[in-house]
Amino acid sequence: MYDDMLIAGGLGPVAGVDEAGRGACAGPLVAVAVILPPESFDTSQLDDSKNLSETQRERLYPIIMDGALAVSQVIIEAGDCDTWGIQLANLQALRRAVEGLAVTPGFVLTDGFRVPGLTVPNLGMWKGDRLSASVSAASIIAKVTRDRIMDDLDRAYPLYQFAKHKGYATALHQQILDTHGPCPQHRFSYRNVARTTTQEEP
């Protein structure tokens, strides 16, 4: 993994950062930063969270949380995603996740693109959640955290079946939106949500 190269070069500890929910039209954006120990942590089962089953992610979640040197999570609610715009909200969340780490990283790896404004050396990596153990770990924590939030929202807003589509614009979700309109957990700046007008209460 890329982390090992950086640590061997004296640039550790390495923090991996990723988010979940950027492409969703409902629910929060979740950003996570993780620093894994350079030794005594089995990274062989880590992968991009999208390549893992829900059962695999749930099993890895406590292993990462218990074994990591530091984990920082930031949740940006749907309304703030609308207020700031998703790109700014995403960058803000990723920066805050790094800043919230209890251990100061020597280098930061982010999935896909570089995050401006970080105060330590950093690099954006295409498919970083497959090339970096720490980014993979962050991807898993972010996905599990957000999925659990969407399950809670499913119980609060059962009409929208958030547990099934997790807030993404699937055919089922769009059909529900077109029929019932959005609820307060939707991102009203998104085009497919904005075109619906009736707002459901909890």
Image (cartoon, rainbow, N blue to C red):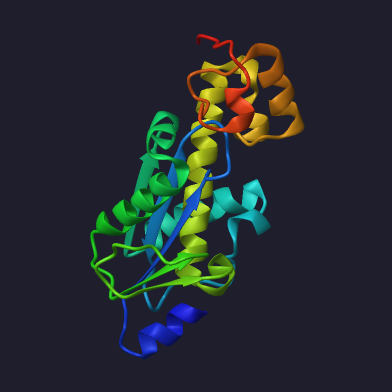
Q: Position of residue 157 (x, y in %)?
A: 55, 17
- Find residue 194 and report its image quarter: top right
Near-viewer residue (73 or 197) = 197
Residue 197 versus residue 110 in the image, above or below: above
Q: Where is residue 138 in the image (x, y as percent from the top left)?
A: 46, 58
Residue at 59%, 64% (x, y): give it: 47
- List the single residue furthest toward the bottom: 9
Residue at 37%, 54% (x, y): give it: 94
Counting the numbered discs, the total is 0
Left or right of residue 112: residue 8: left
Near-viewer residue (40 or 48) = 48
Left or right of residue 29: residue 172: right
Residue at 48%, 52% (x, y): give it: 19
Residue at 43%, 40% (x, y): give it: 85
Residue 142 versus residue 12 in the image, above or below: above
- Find residue 71 and report its image quarter: bottom left
Residue 113 versus residue 191 in the image, above or below: below
Near-viewer residue (130 or 83) = 83
Q: Where is residue 10 in the image (x, y as percent from the top left)?
A: 30, 88
Q: Position of residue 142 (x, y in %)?
A: 48, 49
